[in-house]
Structure formats: C-alpha cells, structure tokens
Image (cartoon, helix red, strand yellow):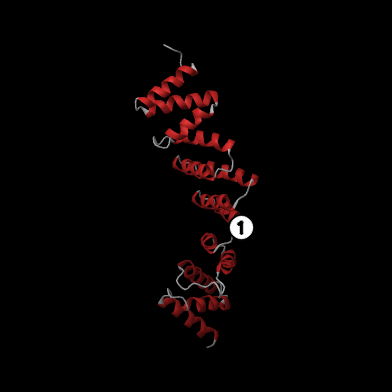
Amino acid sequence: RQPPDDMAWRERLAKVAEWTSRPEMALEHWWHLARETQRDDAWQSVLRLAPGLLNDPALIAALQYQLARQPDALRQLQELVAARERQGEPKMALHYLERFNRRSPRAQTLEMMADLADRAAEPGIALQTWQGLFEQPGEATPARLLRAATLAMLQGNTAQALNWLELAQPSAASNNSEDENQREILRLTGQLATQEQREAQAIRAFTKLSLHELAAEGDFDSLISLLENDHP
C-alpha cells in the first residue's frame, strides 16, 4: 500500500479509475496531483472531467490555472464567471474581471463585467463599466446602449439614460422599421423625455416611432398628446 502523498501512486490510481469508468475517483486524484505538482497534464485532466461531474470547485481551480497561462482565453474566462455564479460567488468573479480589465480592457470582457455587475447588485460598477466600453470606438451599439440606458433609468439616472438612448437612435439612412431594438429605444426615449418635460426630444422620438412598422396605438396617442400640448 502506497502513502497518499506518493504522486506516482496518485497518477496510477487516476488512470485506472478512468479506464474502469469511475470518473469521480479519477477527478479526485488528478486534482490532488495537479495541486501538488502543478503539472499541466493533471490540470488538463481536471478541466476535462470537472464539467461533466458538475464539480465547480475543481473546475474553478483548473480554469484559474489555465487563465494564468493564457490570460486572453475568453471562453475559459466566461466559464470561470459562470462557475463562480453557480457557486453563489458573483462578486469574486467580478473582482477577477476588474483585475483583468485593468490589465487588458477589451469590449467583450467589459460587456461581460457590466452584465455581471448588474446581476451582482452592483449597479454603480455596471454603469461605470458601460461608460468605459462606450468610450471605445465603434462599441456603443444600439443593443448595448439600450441595456445600459435601461439600467440607468432603473437607478433613477434619467439624464444618463436619455443621453445613451439618443446615441442609440438610428440615422435615417440606417433606419430599419422592423428592428425591435429600434422600436424599444425610440419608445423609451419618448417616455423618459416626456417624464423629464423634454417635449422636443419626446416629439422627435415618437415621430420616428410612428414610422416604425411595429409601432403600437399607444405610441401614436403619445405623439398626438405631445403635439397638442406643443400647439394648443
């Protein structure tokens, strides 16, 4: 009988466990071997076995090892965030993304961080992250702006919400009357601008929305009411 700290013994047990279809035992020994030796083949075995066994602690450890070697591996980063959330640790994932984005901010990881911060009940971090993302050329897409504006509105920051919604509105050349995002952007702009007594902005939004194939009866009613108030 070999002592449990004999790494060669652990490796043989791991391999035999896999050959005999005992993946839980195999994972236990590969993970021990990986922690003690930091061998790449052991960590790769943990990465291979842990997801199918729903062993998030082992998966998190292996993903952290992998990301230390390949920090730009976006798929592994997404898996790490998801595993942390499944473990009820979204803020640990958020801290990891914060460190990652300080070192190498990328549009996809900033968007991931903004969405995670929202789910982790950190709206201030989410809004700040959206702002940082929108400062990157070409990244202020209508879909992202709509999500950020909705969050800003829910936090009572209607001025910021309206600024982002204004950026999200399509030009006449790019207008697509069948785009549901455009409809929601115009409708929310009109509603918020009306609430903030910015009638001119509200009229512009509802006028564009009235040309939209997906406009509802209430959208026309809102436009008529605004025009009547503007020209009694």
**Helix, strand or loop status at disc 1:** helix
In the image, 60: left or right of 138? left
> Farthest residue toward the front?
19
| Residue found at x 48% / y 66% | 181
Q: Position of residue 15 (x, y in %)?
A: 42, 24
When the figure is inspected, residue 225 is found, relative to residue 103, above or below; the finding is below
> Farthest residue toward the top?
1
When the figure is inspected, residue 124 is found, relative to residue 5, above or below; the finding is below
Q: Residue type at mark 1: give it.
A: Gln
When the figure is inspected, residue 179 is found, relative to residue 100, above or below; the finding is below
Label 1: how many residues lie within 10 Å, few (<14), some (14-19) or many (20+)? some
Q: Position of residue 43 (x, y in %)?
A: 50, 30
Q: Position of residue 197 (x, y in %)?
A: 56, 75
Q: Position of residue 42 (x, y in %)?
A: 49, 28
In the image, 56: left or right of 155? left
When the figure is inspected, residue 67 is found, relative to residue 11, above or below; the finding is below
| Residue found at x 51% / y 68% | 185
Looking at the rendering, in which quadrant would you find the N terminus? top left
Dot 1 corresponds to which residue? 131
**How many marks overall?**
1
| Residue found at x 46% / y 31% | 46
